[in-house]
Image (spheres, rainbow, N blue to C red):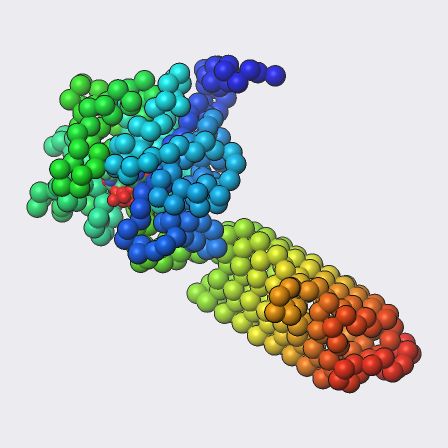
């Protein structure tokens, strides 16, 4: 075991010996802002993109790159943000929202003894990828700069800080749009809001940042000019894909982020062997697992926390909601909804029906129009459908109830609340009554 205080040292040794040499970094994620432009009661970083909070995408980056420690600066709606983010990070409070420089500065006390790279990310940039941030870190370590800024080119740089460069090319300043001259506003290279800093220098230079008179905030972006004025080296790394820098400030930005991440998710599934007939009308949220050779038909929505096996056929026009588990070789057809339900192998649920809080055994058949009436107005109740059971068209199963293995529920029947249909029996009517044992082969 290595004592925690020696951990950074161990990583430094690994750095020197060439094992994952960029791992010696700690991260700060800025997430205290008010998000005024969202016009929302929900803190900005908790708005969802493809079913997942915006800040989770940023946390995925620091987690995947093995940040030694991650500090999340919280302020506006702090309790909600803390609850959503959960364990594994250090929360740092910013009581008065005095700007991005002040937000980073709140972490000073926590990072006093730390020597190494500090990665700063904004909690509102969900499109940013792990690969780009890894390149930023690598570039920072290689160039031995005091600070390295991630930049990107945007056709419409509206609202972003502009990268002002010297004639020869090096960065000279980051100019916020509000403070930019007419010429500077035309610049299409922007500050993506991701930076690497040298831990020894950043907190010293932050002391020198002056209040921006227009916005009454301390801008983190001002440290670039301050470092250069002290003769320090500032580098940039430019992302090839401009859209990666998208910051979510408005609902329109949110929709744009959604469109980009949706494409990414669809590509990932297609590359791993899933047929998506029409990516334009298929919505798959983050955190969905789909097996090979499964075909997703158009106009289908698959929410987070859904798992689908191999060789399934889903849709068209199906909606699979969180907590759904579908085994191999299952057909979920048109106008079907499935929620918090586990479906065994080879089940057919082919036409307009709803399964909620149910388990369905192997080889069962769910007829057209079947509904599990899972909600009694107070509680969600469970339905259990045994293997090879056959639920006739338009049957309503009022939960809780249990349909035994191989049982048949006749078309149009209503299985009353609390009723169990024993295995191998035929039940029909409203309310459904067991009328006979099923002779195998004859119905
Ligand atoms: C910021 C940058 C801008 C850059 C853009 C990239 C500054 C001054 N400007 O602008 O150059 O192009 O990001 O997306 O840094 N926050 C706090 N505490 C505060 C203020 C903000 O934690 O007091 C957090 C916010 O929650 C947000 C992040 O910092 O996650 C950025 O703040 P935001 O107000 O969105 O800055 P932008 O105007 O987008
Ligand atoms: Ca922003």
Looking at the image, the residue that sits furthest to the front is 378
The reply, left or right, for residue 356 in relation to residue 123 is right
Residue 90 point in image, percent of width and height: 45, 31
Along the horizontal axis of the image, is 138 left or right of 190?
A: right
Can residue 343 be seen?
A: no
In this orientation, which residue lies closer to the viewer: 41 or 344? 41
Q: Nearer the viewer, residue 118 or 164?
A: 118
Place of residue 354 in the rendered image (x, y in percent of width and height, measured from the top left): 63, 71
Query: Residue at the spot x=53%, y=59% of the render?
Result: 303
* Relative height, residue 237 to residue 129 (above, below): above
Residue 58 visible in this rendered orientation of the protein: yes
Q: Which quarter of the figure has residue 378?
A: bottom right
User: How many discs appear?
Assistant: 0
- The quarter in which the C terminus is drawn is bottom right
On the image, the x and y values in percent for residue 188 come to 20, 45
Q: Is residue 401 above or below residue 287?
A: below
**Image height check: is 236 above or below 369?**
above
Residue at the (34%, 24%) spot, across then down: 108
Tell me the residue at 49%/36% (across/down).
64
* Residue at 66% from the left image edge and 72% from the top image edge: 373
Q: Quadrant of ligand 1?
A: top left
Q: Nearer the viewer, residue 355 or 166?
A: 355
Q: Is residue 225 left or right of residue 271?
A: left
Q: Is residue 58 above or below residue 173?
A: below
Image quadrant occupied by the N terminus: top right
């Amino acid at each position: 075991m290595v004592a925690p205080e020696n951990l950074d040292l161990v990583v430094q040794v690994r750095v020197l010996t060439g094992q994952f040499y960029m791992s010696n970094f700690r991260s700060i994620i800025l997430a205290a802002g008010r998000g005024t432009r969202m016009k929302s009661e929900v803190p900005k970083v908790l708005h969802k993109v493809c079913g997942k909070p915006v800040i989770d995408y940023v946390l995925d980056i620091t987690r995947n790159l093995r940040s030694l420690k991650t500090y999340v600066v919280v302020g506006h709606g702090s309790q909600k943000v803390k609850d959503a983010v959960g364990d594994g990070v250090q929360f740092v409070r910013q009581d008065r929202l005095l700007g991005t420089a002040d937000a980073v500065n709140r972490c000073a006390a926590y990072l006093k003894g730390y020597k190494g790279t500090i990665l700063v990310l904004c909690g509102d940039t969900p499109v940013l990828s792990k690969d780009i941030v890894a390149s930023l870190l690598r570039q920072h370590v290689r160039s031995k700069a005091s600070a390295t800024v991630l930049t990107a080119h945007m056709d419409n740089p509206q609202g972003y800080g502009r990268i002002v460069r010297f004639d020869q090319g090096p960065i000279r300043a980051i100019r916020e749009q509000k403070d930019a001259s007419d010429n500077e506003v035309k610049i299409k290279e922007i500050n993506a809001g991701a930076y690497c800093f040298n831990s020894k220098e950043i907190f010293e230079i932050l002391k020198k940042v002056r209040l921006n008179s227009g916005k009454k905030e301390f801008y983190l972006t001002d440290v670039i000019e301050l470092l250069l004025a002290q003769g320090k080296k500032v580098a940039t790394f430019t992302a090839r894909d401009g859209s990666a820098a998208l910051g979510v400030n408005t609902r329109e930005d949110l929709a744009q982020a959604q469109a980009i991440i949706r494409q990414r998710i669809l590509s990932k599934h297609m590359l791993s062997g899933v047929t998506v007939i029409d990516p334009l009308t298929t919505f798959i949220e983050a955190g969905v697992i789909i097996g090979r050779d499964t075909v997703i038909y158009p106009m289908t929505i698959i929410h987070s926390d859904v798992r689908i096996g191999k060789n399934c056929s889903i849709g068209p026009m199906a909606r699979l909601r969180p907590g759904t588990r579908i085994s191999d070789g299952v057909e979920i057809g048109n106008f079907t909804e499935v929620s918090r339900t586990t479906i065994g192998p080879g089940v057919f649920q082919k036409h307009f029906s709803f399964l909620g809080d149910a388990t369905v055994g192997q080889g069962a058949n769910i007829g057209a129009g079947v509904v599990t009436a899972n909600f009694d107005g107070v509680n969600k109740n469970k339905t259990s459908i045994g293997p090879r059971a056959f639920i006739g068209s338009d049957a309503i199963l009022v939960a809780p109830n249990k349909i035994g293995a191989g049982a048949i529920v006749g078309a149009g029947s209503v299985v009353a609340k609390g009723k169990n249909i024993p295995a191998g029996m035929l039940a029909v009517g409203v309310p459904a009554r067991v009328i006979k044992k099923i002779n195998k082969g004859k119905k």
